[in-house]
Image (cartoon, rainbow, N blue to C red):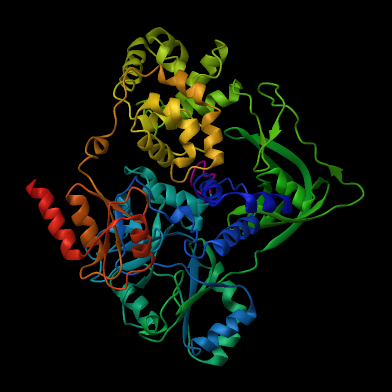
Amino acid sequence: MEDIKNKFEKLKAAEQIRLLKLWDDAYYNQDNPLVTDEEYDYYVAYYNSKHQDKKYTSSLGNSSDDFKKFTHQYPVLSLAKITTKEGYDEYGKKFDYNVVVEPKIDGLTVVYYPDGTLVSRGNGHVGEILPNAKFIMGLPKPLDKPVRIEVCIDKDVYVTIPGANKNARNLAAGILRRKTQTEEIKYLTYYAYNILGSDLSEENQLITLRQNGFKIVDYVKLDSDERYNNYFESLSTLSDVCLAPTDGIVIKSNLPELANSMGMTAHHPNNMVAFKFESQIAETTLTDIEWSMGRTTFTPVAIFNPVILGGSTVQKASLHNLNIINKLGLKIGSKVCVTLKNEIIPQIISCHNSADSICITVPESCPYCGEKLCINSSEELECQNEECPHLLLNDIERLVSKEAMDINGISEAKAVDIYNYMVSKNMGRFAFNLYNFNVDKIQEALSCSYSSASIFYNAIQKTRINVDPARFLYACNVPNLGLNTAKDIMKFFDYDIQKFLDEFHDKALEIDGIGEIIKNSITNRLYYISRCSLMINSFKAPEIVNKKSAAKNFVITGTLKEPRKYYEDLITKHGHVFQKSITKTTDYLICGEKAGSKKAKAEKMGITILTEEELINKLKEGDQK
């Protein structure tokens, strides 16, 4: 790990951020961590120690462009964490031994507002409106104050879901964040956590929630030092019997108005804390390593003698990358200790080798193309052969996906059929060959009727016209490139594909958030992207770009007379853009009282600063033009 630490520390800040976001995406969205928890925590702590004025928070919590943004009425912060008896004792004294203790639900935090709007926690200050959340079964009418709930999948429901291969939390988040309602919404449930902005004690908040039809978890009220100290040994029992997946215990002060009097840090409230358990651990013997190929990398999967953890039989655990194998010193025949991360995901945490242990054999060549495998910067085993048949399948799946070219009717199974057909015809790694298919080829590839093939043909050809350049770039399946980054890149080049192809290599690092990793990934595939562009009949910039000459970018800071969302809605309703932070594209900063570092940054960058009244007048002036 020391070698990787040294490499990380030598990177530019923008590149460090890029790596942290890449690791966040792999962990939260792909359920395929690229670094261990210990390493991730180190990297975040290192970055934040060097950038006190602009600390990094997980990209999972950052709102994206896919949903409408919403500024929370009250901060929705995560909890400080303790793991020891000493920490438990400290908070008992701090809370005067008058507390409510309840299981900590491992779910997605959502705020249920009085008008029925349901919003993700986001970064604690700005979240996203989740249109599908209203379909969660059993959700009662809202209260007159916002309610913080945890959306999750109960443990007994999760085990019945066909083909579930993500942990329960990630699966719940994925279902909730879909743009359209799907039948999987039936798997979701919720538990109310507390009432934001309430002066009631925590217990009275829970009682109020239950009386108004909200589901809450079982809790325990402790009101003396004797009861508090004696209850420590029972903490895990409270978590074990909970129907929902849990990852610890929440200890809340039960004194009314304490949330206001004790205040909060930038990251967590001071009137409650999370106690995290040591995980249940079982010892077994490592018997084999399987190598599972993902998009371009081979993931080592440990096979061991079955053990019982969390009431289930476990005999496999992903090792994610070679660094974990080396760090643990794993060998075949080793005694290994296995636990369940977040009560769901099997994880090997230690290893003891014997004289009979056998070194793990790392594959040297790709089984699909025979080319030599390489070890990338994330210590992953990777096939870098651009013509590898297996990579073609990933390219096809990306090409037809809704976020890319959105080819109607081409399911995952049909993508596999197209892949098999292309391989059988020796078409090489060029997914965009799909656009050269006539009706006969489609009929042969999908083994369907001529009329069905005609429908598929028309659906494919339709997506060649007026293509959004950002979605096209995303469809090219460049490693490490997400849709939001593709949007940022194409916006920089005025949504001009040829300008992008001609100038990207020289200007890449001028784009906000682009570092060496993304630059190199795209540069290595520029010729491929150019080939793909020839398959598109016409490109068309999104409508927002056509209005960009009139639209201005606004940032807000300080305490305002009206709720921040009032001004955000006002700005967007007048055709302008609301930004969370100041960038070189910012036109105006709206300053309220107690303006912080944003004002100083705006002054330094020459950005126009407006009062609330000046903002309203400027918007009116725009309406009159």
Q: Residue 196 in the image: x percent, y percent? A: 33, 72
Identify the residue at image location x=10%, y=49%. 623
> Is residue 214 in view from this perspective?
no
Residue 185 placement (x, y as % from top left): 37, 48
Residue drawn 48% across the image and 59% down it: 57
> Is 571 part of what is drawn in magenta?
no
Is residue 409 shown above or below 103?
Answer: above
Q: Residue furthest right?
A: 355
- In the rendered image, the residue lying farthest to the top is 440
Residue 216 appearing in the image: yes
Q: Is residue 161 magenta?
A: yes
- Is 146 situated left or right of 612 in this image? right
Compare residues 111 and 384 and report the one nearer the observer: 384
Residue 432, placed above or below residue 489: above
Q: Position of residue 221 (x, y in %)?
A: 46, 83
Query: Mostly what secondary structure, the magenta segment?
Result: loop
In the picture, the quarter occupied by the C terminus is top left
Q: Is residue 136 left or right of residue 302?
A: left
Closer to us: 35 or 200: 35
Q: Please tell me how many numbered marks the rendered image carries.
A: 0
Q: Residue furthest left?
A: 624
**Span shown in magenta:** 159-166
Q: Nearer the viewer, residue 50 or 422?
A: 50
498 w.r.t. 182: above or below: above
Find residue 118 and report its horizontal and vertical position in percent. 30, 58
